[in-house]
Image (spheres, rainbow, N blue to C red):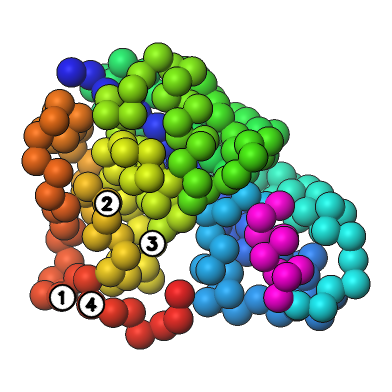
Amino acid sequence: MQPTVLFDLDGLLIDSEPIWDAAKREVFGPLGLHLTVEMQAATRGLRQRDMVAYWFDRATLRADPDEVEQRIVAAVCRGLEEVALKPGAEHAVAACARASRAMAVVSSSPESVIRAALASTGLDRSFDAVFSAEDDEHGKPHPGAYLRAAAALGASPDECVVIEDSFNGVLAGVSARMTVVAVPEAADRCDPRYAIATLVLESLKDLDTSVFGAYVSGGSQETTWASRATDPQPFREPDRAV
């Protein structure tokens, strides 16, 4: 069975997380909110409106949340003009194009950001559709965006493979009852929560689409750690706060 493959975007296909982090520091800093690496990680994978609401709930910020969100998105769009692909992105997209019946990007970012990023990296012709959670009632980790994408592409959840980097995205895919391939950032690879994914890879370079059939066709659902890391305890508790 050829699956429908649903890719996340930021931090997975494109190296945009530093751009988002810089934009948030640029906008929140003058308001008195100085985001640490751990604070940035806490909201990774969320929609911008949800991220902004998260910090307005936790800090005294004298600003309009909508304006803050718009300023962050504008700063990111400027930064995306020269965004780089993540290692293995071209390999993964090409391999999935050969192995799938349909492919789409499903992202928490606004559609304008998604399309700008795909055009900038030359991936805009690689996908059958683009889905943004921007206007959904709930964003990731809610599964709504993935379920909506599957329905639009004529696929049932058990025919879909989700490829994600953030835990919020992984949780969305798992909640949608889809096969989930997680490709966490190096700093997150020891986070035991990623064990809920079907497969966990070090890099998109390691993606082997030949294994999809074992899961999408109803094969074993045991989690597999596909890392080449020498760490004998890949799921140990991380030392940093999450």
Q: Which amino acid does label 3 sit on?
A: Glu
Asked whether, in this view, residue 176 is left or right of residue 3, the answer is right
Specify the quadrant that holds the N terminus: top left
- Does the residue at mark 1 contact the one at mark 4 (Cβ under 8 Å)? yes
Q: Which mark is residue 197?
A: 2
- Does the residue at mark 4 contact the one at mark 2 (Cβ under 8 Å)? no
Using the numbered discs, state the Cα–Cα distance from disc 4 to disc 3 in whole angstroms: 16 Å
For label 3, the residue is 185
> Residue 99's quadrant in the figure?
top left
Q: Provide residue 40's location: percent of width, then percent of height.
A: 58, 69
Asked whether, in this view, residue 171 is left or right of residue 213, the answer is right
Mark nearer the N terminus (4 vs 2):
2
Which region shows up in magenta? 49-58
- Does the residue at mark 3 contact the one at mark 2 (Cβ under 8 Å)? no
- Seen at 45% across and 34% down, the residue is 146
Between disc 1 and disc 2, the foreground one is 2
Q: Residues within 10 Å of mark 3 (few under 14, many from 20)?
A: some
Asked whether, in this view, residue 194 is left or right of residue 122, the answer is left
> Residue 6's quadrant in the figure?
top left
Q: Provide residue 198's location: percent of width, then percent of height.
A: 22, 47
Specify the quadrant that holds the C terminus: bottom left
Residue closest to the eye, 101 or 221? 221
Using the numbered discs, state the Cα–Cα distance from disc 1 to disc 4 in whole angstroms: 6 Å
Q: For residue 20: magenta?
A: no
Using the numbered discs, state the Cα–Cα distance from disc 3 to disc 1 in whole angstroms: 17 Å
- Seen at 38% across and 50% down, the residue is 170
For label 1, the residue is 233
Using the numbered discs, state the Cα–Cα distance from disc 3 to disc 2 in whole angstroms: 15 Å
> Residue 50's quadrant in the figure?
bottom right
Using the numbered discs, state the Cα–Cα distance from disc 1 to disc 2 in whole angstroms: 17 Å
